[in-house]
Amino acid sequence: MKSNYCSLLVVLAQLSLPSCRNLPTPAPEETVWRELGAAYPTMTEITEVRANIGSSVSELIEDLASEELLQRRQAAYTIEYLGPAAISALGPLIAACRSEKNQINRAFMVRAIAAIDDSTPETLGFLRLLFHDSQNKILRTYLAGAILKLTELHQSEVELQYLLDSVNPKGSENELIDEISRNEFWEQRWAAAYMIAKLQKKAISFIPALEQISEAADVPGWVRKEFWFTLSKISHFE
């Protein structure tokens, strides 16, 4: 990587790490899908990146191919917040997502693809194939939300039903056999709320389901908070 990479990463985030090339690799058993694994860039830093979008996106594209797991995740997260301004990263982002082995990283990349807001057949075809092939319920929830963001709801009935099922506070009780499966169950519900918030006016149809889970007695606080946030964000579209 070029010597100016460290300067760019300082703009992206104050990671408080000894070197921008020595990001810590999370333990293989990591289960917190909603967390980046490093300090998040501030909106001020994201704004500064937008001001130098050409060189910034070039650096992020290079970072998507990094051997460092968190380097790739950080790049995907930043592209998500750049949104359509990072359209030049779409091809490399899809390629990175296709080859990515870490499922949490894939989720961050799917979120970034959705944020770029490209609904061409190539992009939708990739997302639909990944949704069809994936066995991971949390990743499939992010994929369902991404597909619905880029299509009309009636065009993606399978993904619509999957996202609706993902906000069911009860689900299959047989799945909650241990702490890991319980955490994954609620991570899936958090992911559903996160993606529904991206649907804007299309999210209106989810309001009854969101209200149901936000009022359920056994919902963890961090999940309830995300559902309240989503409800507040989409309520003005009614």
Image: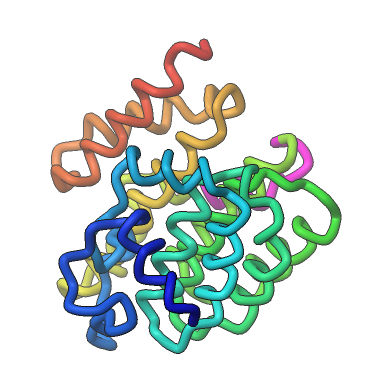
Picture coordinates of residue 128, whole percent (x, y): 72, 62
How many numbered discs, if any?
0
Picture coordinates of residue 176, whole percent (x, y): 24, 67
Q: Is residue 81 above or below residue 205?
A: below
Q: Is residue 143 left or right of residue 137?
A: right
Residue placed most toward the observer, 176 or 221: 221
Q: Is the magenta region chiefly helix, strand or loop?
A: helix
Please tell me which residue is depicted at 50% across the width and 74% down the height of the picture. Answer: 63
Residue placed most toward the observer, 171 or 155: 155
Please tell me which residue is depicted at 36% across the width and 25% down the height of the picture. Answer: 231
Q: Is residue 67 above or below residue 107?
A: below
User: Would you say residue 162 sits in the magenta stretch?
Assistant: yes
Q: Is residue 14 above or below residue 155?
A: below
The residue lying furthest to the front in this view is: 3
Specify start and end residues of the magenta stretch as a single range.
Answer: 153-163
Picture coordinates of residue 97, whole percent (x, y): 59, 73
Residue 161 shows up from this direction: no
Residue placed most toward the observer, 229 or 6: 6
The color scheme shown is: rainbow
Please tell me which residue is depicted at 70% across the width and 36% down the height of the picture. Answer: 153
Q: Is residue 119 left or right of residue 38?
A: right
Q: Quadrant of residue 10?
A: bottom left
Residue 147 shows up from this direction: yes
Q: Quadrant of residue 93?
A: bottom right
User: Would you say residue 118 sits in the magenta stretch?
Assistant: no
Q: Is residue 214 left or right of residue 195?
A: left
Please tell me which residue is depicted at 63% across the width and 41% down the height of the picture. Answer: 149
